[in-house]
C-alpha cells in the first residue's frame, strides 16, 4: 500500500519497483503503480507500441524514463508555479528544476495503489490531500484494460474539496522516434516563448502541420495543439504494426526533441498554462465539490498497410 504522498524518486534504489502484468491474446502490458502509476511497456505480437522501459530506467524510478504516466490534476506547465483562482493568488511548489514552473501535476511523482480486476485489466488509485504541491484534495483512478490489440485507458478524477476546483486528467505516452510518421489534424497550435510558455495561437503550418502525415525525426517541437479531431496515427515503415490513437480530450501536446530516441503525443484536457490563460480554449476544467472529470484514450495496434 502507498502512503498519501510518496515520491518514487526517494524510494530505495537497491531493487527494482514491483510491476503488474496484464495480458490478453497477443497483447501484453506492464504497469508500475508505485512509480507514478506509470506504464512500463505495451507490446502486441512482440512489437513495442510504446517506448519500452529498460532495466536501468525501471531502477531509476524516474517516470520520465518510462513508457507513459498520468497527468493529474493538470497537464504540462503552470507558469512560474502560480495562478489566480477566484481572486486568490495560488502558489505551488516548482517541480521541474531548473525551470521555475510546476509541471504535469502531482500524480506522476506519487505512489498509486492497484486492484487487479482480471488478467487483462486493473484499476490504479491515488488520493491527494491538499498540500503545497496542489491546494485541493482529490482522488484519481486509472482503469487500464487490454482488449485484443487495444490498450484502453479510462481516467477519472474526483473533487474531494468543499469548493469548485480546477481538475483535469490526461496521459503522457512516449513512442519510438526512429522512422516514425505522425498524422493528426488540429485547428490551432500555440507558439512558445523562451520559458516554454504559450504565447500566440496560430493555424498549424509548415513544420507544425501533420494533417497529411509527416516524419518525426529531425524536428524540434514542444507545443500544444488545440481543437484536434481526436484521432492520430503513427506509422513505422519497417514494422508490421502501426498505431491509432483516439481520445475525447480536446487538446494534444506534441514533444519531439531534436536528438532524442523518443517523442510524445499526449492527449490532454486543456492548453498549456491554461490557469494563466483562462480566456483561451480549451480551458482548464472546473469541477464542483463531489463531482468528477472523466477522459479516455484508446491505443489500437493496426496493420501498417491500413494506415
Image (cartoon, rainbow, N blue to C red):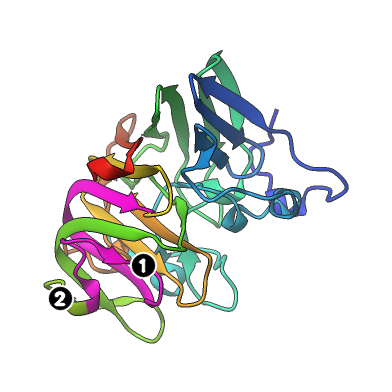
User: Any magenta on residue 125?
Assistant: no
Q: Nearer the viewer, residue 126 or 134?
A: 126
Q: Nearer the viewer, mark 2 or mark 1?
A: 1
Observer able to see residue 137: yes
Residue 270 placed where, x, y %? 27, 55
Mark carried by residue 157: none
Q: Residue furthest bottom?
A: 194
Residue 239 placed where, x, y %? 43, 48
> Disc 1 on helix, strand or loop?
loop
Residue 26 placed where, x, y %? 49, 24
Residue matched to label 1: 216
Residue matched to label 2: 205
> Which residue is at 33% across, 84% downward?
193
Taking the image as shown, residue 22 lies to the left or right of residue 235, namely right
User: Any magenta on residue 219?
Assistant: yes
Instruction: For the residues labelled 2 and 1, say whether their Cβ atoms are less than 8 Å apart.
Output: no
Which image quadrant for residue 292?
top left
Q: Nearer the viewer, residue 32 or 194?
A: 32
Which image quadrant for residue 37?
top right
In the displayed structure, would residue 241 be above or below residue 28? below
Residue 218 placed where, x, y %? 40, 77
> Disc 2 on helix, strand or loop?
loop
Observer able to see residue 128: no
Classify 10 Å Cα crowding around label 2: few (below 14), some (14-19), many (20 and above). Answer: few
Region rendered in magenta: 207-236
> Which residue is at 78% across, 42% downward?
16
Classify 10 Å Cα crowding around label 1: few (below 14), some (14-19), many (20 and above). Answer: many
Mark positioned earlier in the residue sequence (2 or 1): 2
> Which residue is at 42% across, 53% downward?
238
Amino acid at each position: 500500500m502507498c502512503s498519501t504522498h510518496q515520491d518514487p524518486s526517494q524510494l530505495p534504489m537497491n531493487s527494482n519497483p514491483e510491476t503488474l502484468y496484464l495480458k490478453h491474446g497477443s497483447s501484453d502490458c506492464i504497469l508500475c503503480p508505485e512509480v507514478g502509476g506509470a506504464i512500463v511497456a505495451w507490446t502486441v505480437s512482440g512489437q513495442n507500441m510504446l517506448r519500452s522501459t529498460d532495466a536501468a530506467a525501471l531502477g531509476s524510478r524516474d517516470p520520465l524514463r518510462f513508457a507513459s504516466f498520468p497527468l493529474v490534476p493538470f497537464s504540462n506547465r503552470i507558469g512560474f508555479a502560480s495562478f489566480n483562482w477566484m481572486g486568490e493568488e495560488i502558489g505551488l511548489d516548482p517541480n521541474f528544476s531548473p525551470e521555475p514552473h510546476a509541471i504535469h501535476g502531482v500524480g506522476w511523482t506519487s505512489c498509486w495503489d492497484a486492484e487487479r480486476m482480471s488478467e487483462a485489466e486493473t484499476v490504479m488509485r491515488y488520493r491527494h490531500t491538499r498540500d503545497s504541491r496542489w491546494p485541493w484534495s482529490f482522488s484519481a483512478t486509472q482503469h487500464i484494460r487490454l482488449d485484443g490489440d487495444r490498450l484502453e485507458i479510462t481516467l477519472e478524477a474526483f473533487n474531494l474539496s468543499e469548493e469548485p476546483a480546477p481538475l483535469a486528467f490526461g496521459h503522457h505516452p512516449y513512442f519510438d522516434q526512429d522512422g516514425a510518421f505522425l498524422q493528426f489534424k488540429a485547428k490551432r497550435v500555440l507558439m512558445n516563448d523562451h520559458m516554454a510558455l504559450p504565447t500566440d495561437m496560430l493555424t498549424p503550418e509548415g513544420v507544425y502541420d501533420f494533417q497529411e502525415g509527416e516524419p518525426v525525426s529531425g524536428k524540434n517541437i514542444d507545443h500544444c495543439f488545440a481543437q484536434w479531431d481526436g484521432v492520430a496515427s503513427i506509422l513505422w515503415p519497417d514494422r508490421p504494426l502501426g498505431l491509432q490513437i483516439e481520445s475525447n480530450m480536446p487538446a494534444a501536446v506534441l514533444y519531439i526533441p531534436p536528438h532524442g530516441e523518443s517523442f510524445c503525443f499526449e492527449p490532454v484536457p486543456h492548453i498549456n498554462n491554461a490557469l494563466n490563460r483562462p480566456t483561451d480554449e480549451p480551458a482548464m476544467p472546473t469541477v464542483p465539490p463531489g463531482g468528477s472529470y472523466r477522459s479516455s484514450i484508446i491505443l489500437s495496434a493496426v496493420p501498417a498497410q491500413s494506415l
